[in-house]
Amino acid sequence: MDVIDLFPRSIVQGKLNLKLLNQCLLHCENVLRNPGANPDASQRLAGQLSQQRELNPTQPAILELCENVLLNGCEQWIRHVIDRQPPQGRGPWVPGRYQLKLIDIWLNCQRESDYNPMHTHGGSFSGVVFLKVPKQIDGTSFDGQLCFHGPEEYHLQSFRTGMSHYVLPKPGDFYIFPAWQPHSVMPFRGSGERWSLAFNAVAQPGSTRLTPPGKNKNLSLSNQRPRAWGF
């Protein structure tokens, strides 16, 4: 016999190169030294954090991060998931029929006892990039960890396992996921600051059609045979 794990949730995981990580760190240091130069993002966010500052996506380090890493990660998620669907069920999510665009990106500065409650984002994709992590966040407890939540509440006694997945933050690591994916950040104890970048992006369908209007109407998804009613 075998065991089948049903309904997986796909999350892109990667790591920044050291040069880009240092460039982002330097920029965020400047942002926190001059907080008035970057708008406060906390009023529209769920996090109960020390500081949350909007970032300028045209700033060189942030622009490189968004265009060469984050949007590419969204594209990788789409190809990983959509290419496994039947051709007739992929909708507009085939190359050339959509465009990925950044909505916003911001800096999270988390200090002792700060936290981010379980929440979701708007748009199509969201993600986090870890920049700085206090040394006591080491995986020996849930402190400071990012948690991805499943569709049901975790309850071991009734065998509802695998309903939460904790991620230990490490500088340079990033995660990209659908905007509807619930997630949270645990508080931590002790000194230091935990820095991360978060972003939202949207996948916009284009107007280009793969087939001329009027063609392939009323097709069965399963076999493409014309039929009188239905899809």
Image: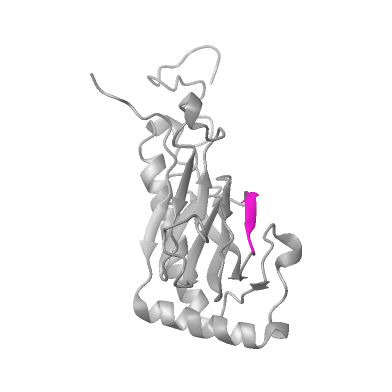
Q: Can residue 43 be spotted in the picture? A: yes
Residue situated in front as seen by the camera: 210 or 73 = 73
Please state the horizontal and vertical placement of residue 50, each as a whole percent of the image. Answer: 67, 71
Residue drawn at (44%, 40%) of the image: 9
Residue drawn at (56%, 66%) of the image: 189
Task: Give the colour scheme of this rendering.
Answer: one colour
Helix, strand or loop for the magenta stretch, by majority: strand
Q: If the image is split into quadrants, where does the N terminus sit?
A: top left
Please state the horizontal and vertical placement of residue 177, each as a whole percent of the image. Answer: 49, 51
Residue drawn at (42%, 50%) of the image: 77
Q: How many marks?
A: 0
Residue drawn at (55%, 13%) of the image: 229
When the figure is inspected, residue 12 is found, relative to residue 192, above or below; the finding is: above
Please state the horizontal and vertical placement of residue 57, each as a whole percent of the image. Answer: 58, 74
Asked whether residue 115 is drawn in magenta, I would say yes
Residue situated in front as seen by the camera: 198 or 201 = 198
Residue found at the very far top of the displayed protein:
228
Q: Which segment did they paint magenta?
A: 114-119
Residue found at the very far left of the displayed protein:
1
Left or right: residue 92 compared with residue 184: left
When the figure is inspected, residue 192 is found, relative to residue 104, above or below; the finding is: below
Asked whether residue 12 is drawn in magenta, I would say no
When the figure is inspected, residue 228 is found, relative to residue 82, above or below; the finding is: above
Residue situated in front as seen by the camera: 219 or 106 = 106
Please state the horizontal and vertical placement of residue 91, each as a whole percent of the image. Answer: 49, 37
When the figure is inspected, residue 220 is found, relative to residue 34, above or below; the finding is: above
Q: Can residue 121 be spotted in the picture? A: no
